[in-house]
Image (spheres, rainbow, N blue to C red):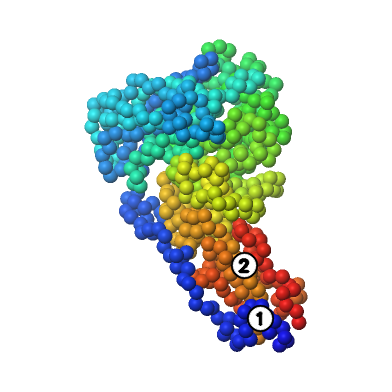
Amino acid sequence: MKKRIFMLAMLMGIGTLPFQSFAQQAEKSNQSKFGEFRDRTGNYYRSASGKPGEGYWQNRADYVIEATLDDEAHTLTGQITMNYTNNSPEALEFVWMQMEQNRFTETSRGTLTTPIQGNRYNGDTDGGYEISNLQAKVGKKGTLSSEYLINDTRMQVWFAEPIPANGGTATVSMNFSYKIPTDGMDRMGKLKVEDGYIYAMAQWYPKVAVFDDIEGWNVEPYLGAGEFYLEYGDFDYKITVPYDHIVVGSGKLMNPKEVLSAEVYDRYEKAMNSDQTVYLISPDEIKNHELTRPKQEGTITWHFKIQNTRDVAFSSSDAFIWDAARINLPSGKKILAQSTYPKESDGVDAWTRSTEYSKASIEHYSEMWFEFPYETATNVAADIGGMEYPGLNFCSYRSTGEGLWGVTDHEFGHNWFPMIVGNNERRYAWMDEGFNTFINHYSSNAFNNGEYPSSLNQTRRYLNWFTNERREGIDTYPDVSNLGNLGMIAYNKPAMGLLMLREYILGHERFDHAFKSYIKNWAYKHPTPDDFFNLMENVAGENLSWFWQGWFYGTGNIDLGISTVAPYAGNFVAVLTNEGEIPMPVLLEITFEDGSTERQMLPVEIWQRGNSWNHLIKTDKKVTGVVIDPDKILPDVNLGNDSWPTNIYKD
C-alpha cells in the first residue's frame, strides 16, 4: 500500500503529504472569464429582467396590396398602401422603406460586393423597382407629399408635416413594378419546369424599415447574407394571375369558392378535416383545367389576409401538384398544411411526403414551445435551397428524403424565430438561425420515431472547425463574416450553445421555463441579444455571463480534462483541469470496481480562482474509471484527456 501511495505521489507531483495537500492552491484569478462583460442594467423600455419594459414601444405597419403577375413578360406590377402608426416617443419627419428588388441591378451594393467567382447570393442584375404615383400624408386630412429619395435598396419618404409621437398615423401609397429575377439570391425568383413556370415571390413589395429604441432607423442595405428586420401589422393582399395558375400565399385564402373549381373546393374542405394527405390537384391533373379551374380564360384574382405578421410571400404556377392535410394545434384549432410542387418533384421519396413533414413540424413546435398563429403552413417547391416567410416556405424542388425533411422542418421552424419572435436578422443572424437549428434538433429526433435523427446529436463532429484558425465569433454580422464560417456561427454554434444549456448546464425544467418565457414575452416584438441573455438568467435563476461571453462573444474552446485519480484515506481524489478558454460545469461519471456507476456534477464556480481543481470522491468502493461529460454533449476539443483509465495505478 505504501508503495502504491508513493508511486501516485510521484506521478501527481504532490509528495507523501497529509490530505490537506489536496486543497486548492492559489492561482491567477479567472475573474476575466466570470466578470460582467456587458451592461446588465435595464431601462424604461427594456427591463433588466429581460422582459419588455413599462415603456416598451414599437411602430406598426398595416398593408393593403394589389398586384398582377404577367407570365409572358415575367413582371409584377402592383399598388401598395401602407398605413403606419408611430408609437415612438418622438415625431417622425420621414420613414425609410426597404426596396429589396433594387438589389437586382448592376450598380447595387450587393452586386458590387459579390465576389467575381460568385456565391450563394448571386442575383440577376437587370431588374429593380420602377416607382410612380407616390403619395404620403399624415393622418386622414394631412397635406399630400410626393417627396422621396431612393438610394440602393432603401427609399426615404418625406411628409409635409411630422408624424406625431405616441400614436400618430400616416399613409404611404405608390405604384410599383419590376422584372421578376430568375436568380433571386436563393430567396425568390422563377423556375422553368416542363409544365410551365413556378414563381417564388418574396421581397416583392416596398416595405417600411424598423424604427426602434436601439438605433432609431435600421437602414442597413440588403447585400446578401443578412436577412430581414420588419415591423408587425396586418396584410390584405390580392394577386391577379392567368386563369390557369394556382396561387398559395402567407395567411388565409379569403375567396376559395371564387378561385377553385367545385371539385377542388370539395377536396380543399376534405383536406381541412383529414390527418392524411389529400390531393387537391393530382399529378395527372396538372393540365386538366376543366376539372381544376373555375374559368377557362383571362385572369383570376386570389385574395389573402394574415394578421399580426411582419411579411408575406406567395407562389404562382400553372405546373403545380397540390396536396394538403389538417394540422391539429394544442388549443384544439385546426388549420391547413399544404404543398405545391411540379411533377419533377413527385414521388414517395420526395415531395409526396412534404405535407406529412409540414404537419409534423408545425404540430411539434406548437406543442413544445408556442402555438403556431397562422391559418396555413405552406411548402413550395422552387429553385431555392430553403427560405422562410410567415406561414410559407420555398424549398428546393430537387430535395428528397432526409434532405427534404431537414429543409422543410428548418424553414417551418423559422415561424418561431424570427416570424413570432422578431429579432433583427440583418445584424444577429444567430438569434433566428441558431435558435431555429436548436429547436430543429428536437423535432428531428421526434419525427416518426427518429427516422431522420438530428446532426446535433454529435457535437464533436465539428471539432475541425473549432480548431480552425479562420473561425469567427457568433457575434460577427452575417454580411461581414466569411461565408465559409456562416453555417457555424449563425446556425450550428449557437444551437450547440442552447443544447448545452438545456442538456448539460441548466437541465430541461429550468431551461424550458426560461426559453418559453422568452418566446411568450417577445412574441411579435423586437428583442436584442441582451434581452435574451437577461431573461434566460432571470427565469432560470443563474448568472450565465461566463457562458455568454465565452461561447457567443469569442472564438475560445472547451477543453476539460482529468489529470489523474488518486486514492486517499479510503476515498479518491480526481485532479481536474480546464485547458480551454471557456469554463464549464464538470459532469463526472464514476465507475466502481463492482461495475456500478455514479454521476456527480461540479459547478462552474470551481474554475473561478484557477484552472485546476481537486475533487474528493467520497466512497468506500474502489474507483476504476472516471469520465467527463459521459453523454458527449460538450464539443470538447480534446478527446484525449476527458477520461481516466483503469490502469493508472495497481495494488
The amino acid on which the numbered mark 2 sits, given as a three-letter code, is: Gly
Tell me the mark number nearer the camera, choosing from 1 and 2.
Answer: 1
Distance from Cα at disc 1 to Cα at disc 2: 20 Å
Name which residue lies at 60% across and 87% down. 18
Please indicate, yes or no, whether residue 114 appears anywhere in the rendered image. Answer: yes
Q: Which residue is mark 2?
A: 561
Q: Is residue 365 above or below residue 192?
A: below
Give how far across and how far down residue 582 sits, in percent.
53, 62
User: From the viewer's perspective, is 377 left or right of 204?
Assistant: right
Kindly identify which numbered label has been placed on residue 10. Answer: 1
Q: Position of residue 460 (x, y in %)?
A: 64, 55
On the image, the x and y values in percent for residue 307 come to 45, 36
Left-right relation of 309 to 611: left
Between residues 14 and 199, which one lies in front from this camera angle? 14
Q: Amino acid at mark 1?
A: Met
What residue is shown at x 35% (from left), y 28% (from top)?
150
Q: Residue at x 26, y 35 (%)?
A: 93
